[in-house]
Image (spheres, coloured by chain):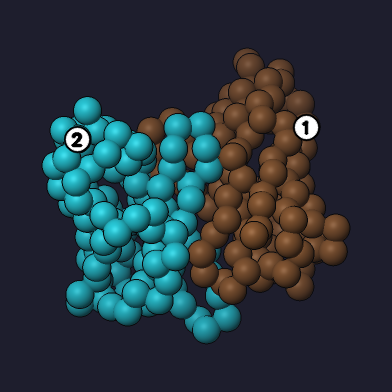
Chain colours: A cyan, B brown
Amino acid sequence: GAGVSQSPRYKVAKRGQDVALRCDPISGHVSLFWYQQALGQGPEFLTYFQNEAQLDKSGLPSDRFFAERPEGSVSTLKIQRTQQEDSAVYLCASSWWTGEGNQPQHFGDGTRLSIL
Amino acid sequence: KQEVTQIPAALSVPEGENLVLNCSFTDSAIYNLQWFRQDPGKGLTSLLLIQSSQREQTSGRLNASLDKSSGRSTLYIAASQPGDSATYLCAVSRYGNKLVFGAGTILRVKS
């Protein structure tokens, strides 16, 4: 596809369940980012991949959050033992990487996660 | 820690009016600044990206300026239209990768 694709669009889970969110970046984009957006707030950085390497995971809020991008393309964000405070929209973004960081990030429509 | 503030939080204007959205950031050591638009239930659409060495960027009715030393950016929208109604987000990047966002300005343009 032409843009960043995320699935599912909506996910409802009971507290304590594990969830997996998928991101399919724009073809050829080296960099991939995950952000968390609470209601009425701007997105907050979670983690960053360059190809398959996870270069920055400083934004992951706890060890219940895990992200991977094993083949340098599709990425999965996994949340274990979900808590109500995990309810948010999870956004994925991708960009070219030129070594100069001057490329815009392109965002998917996000996955809205609701924990009951 | 970088903090980004956007003022006003919400703005309602009649169609045709020119308007300015403000963004400020606490750490001037940025690599670039981006303005995004977010429609309800949607992701972010990149509007303009300004490198730290640039002063402004223009796209159609949009003009963004950057004063890096004072930690400020403005987004100017000329001749606003109802279709411009959305949330506008400002974000800065230090090393050209992860973005730090403001909370956004909710814009409503009335017809």
Chain ID of residue with mark 1: B
Q: State which quarter of the image contains the N terminus of chain B.
A: bottom right
Callout 2 amino acid: Arg
| Front residue of this view, candidates B61 and B31 | B31
Q: Point out which mark residue A15 bears.
A: 2
Task: Judge from the rendering whether residue B83 lies leftward or rightward of residue A82; answer left or right.
Answer: right
Residue drawn 23% across the image and 51% down it: A79
Closer-to-camera residue (A16/B56) = A16
Give the chain of mark 2. A
Is disc 2 placed on a helix, strand or loop? loop
> Residue B67 at what x, y percent from top left?
82, 59
Which amino acid type is marked by label 1?
Asn
Q: Mark 2 packing: few (<14 Cα in 10 Å), some, or many (20+)?
A: some
Quick check: can you spot residue B91?
A: yes
Q: Which mark, residue B18?
A: 1
Quadrant in the picture for residue A17:
top left
- Give the percent coordinates (x, y) of residue A107: 41, 53
- The residue depicted at 51 percent of the width and 64 percent of the height is B98
